Image (cartoon, helix red, strand yellow):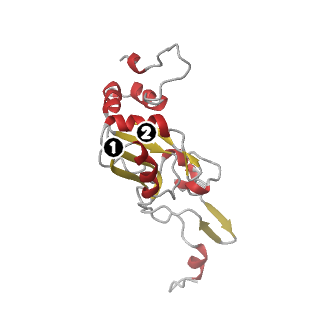
Amino acid sequence: MSLAEFDEIKYDHSTTRLDVPSNYLIRKARRNPHGLEDLRKSMKSATIYVGNLSFYTSEEQIYELFSKCGTIKRIIMGLDRFKFTPCGFCFVIYSTPEEALNAVKYLSDTKLDDRNITLDLDPGFEDGRQFGRGKSGGQVSDELRFEFDASRGGFSVPLVDRIGVNNSHNFGARRVRDTYIPGQDDAFEDEEEELDTYIPGQD
């Protein structure tokens, strides 16, 4: 499959085009059998994807910024799959594709809540895409982050801790798990409580 029509085009003037799909979208399209079709859809879609948001950025702030480029029909906030709290991305749906292209041109790398947000053309929102795809319910990129980021929930939890391999510390006879995963049974029981429990017929 050829994506030549979306590859970088050489121009004589000094600036690069701003109304093209990102490198990420093009790489994703190369791995997807329907990638070329999705890229064509994204160029005609009125939907944009907004990433690298603070968890504390409100829908009102997003509306205030993005309404400068056109009439917004709908904003869909990205949510943690388990907690249903914001997890750092959203979809903005404009009335026309031209307004979406203007947003990508003029608002990419804009600072919102002290974060440089990323914008990308999107083939179109479908129900279910508003939830994070990471194992912990949020975004995969946050699970791969090791530095502290207050606006993205602090420290990310290492993957080994999330699967329960290395998420306990021994303090005397007591084992404490410091990471809670919703919907997962306790892998460790309180050993102090076990020692204090009286069982009839047992010394």
Q: Element type at marker 2?
A: helix
Residue 141 locus on image (x, y percent): 52, 44
Q: Which label sits on residue 103?
A: 2
Circle 2 crowding by C-alpha within 10 Å: few under 14, some 14–19, many from 20: many
Residues 10 and 188: in front is 10
- Seen at 43% across and 58% down, the residue is 60
- Seen at 59% across and 82% down, the residue is 196
Q: Amino acid at mark 1?
A: Tyr
Image quadrant in which the C terminus is located:
bottom right
Q: Is residue 95 left or right of residue 117?
A: left
Task: Give the vertical position of 172 relative to 200 (above or below).
Answer: above
Residues 171 and 73: in front is 73
Residue at the spot of label 1: 94
- Seen at 62% across and 68% down, the residue is 175
Residue 195: image quadrant is: bottom right
Mark positioned earlier in the residue sequence (2 or 1) = 1
Image quadrant in which the N terminus is located:
top left
- Seen at 35% across and 34% down, the residue is 98
Residues 107 and 123: in front is 107
Residue 164: image quadrant is: bottom right
Circle 1 crowding by C-alpha within 10 Å: few under 14, some 14–19, many from 20: many
Residue 13 locus on image (x, y percent): 53, 16
Q: Are marks 2 and 1 in contact (CB under 8 Å)?
A: yes
Mark 2 → mark 1, Cα distance in angstroms = 9 Å
Q: Amino acid at mark 2?
A: Ala
Residues 94 and 190: in front is 94
Task: Give the vertical position of 154 relative to 17 (above or below).
Answer: below
Residue 177 locus on image (x, y percent): 58, 65
Q: Is residue 122 visible?
A: no
Q: Is residue 190 visible?
A: yes
Task: Give the vertical position of 63 relative to 201 (above or below).
Answer: above
Residue 103 locus on image (x, y percent): 43, 39
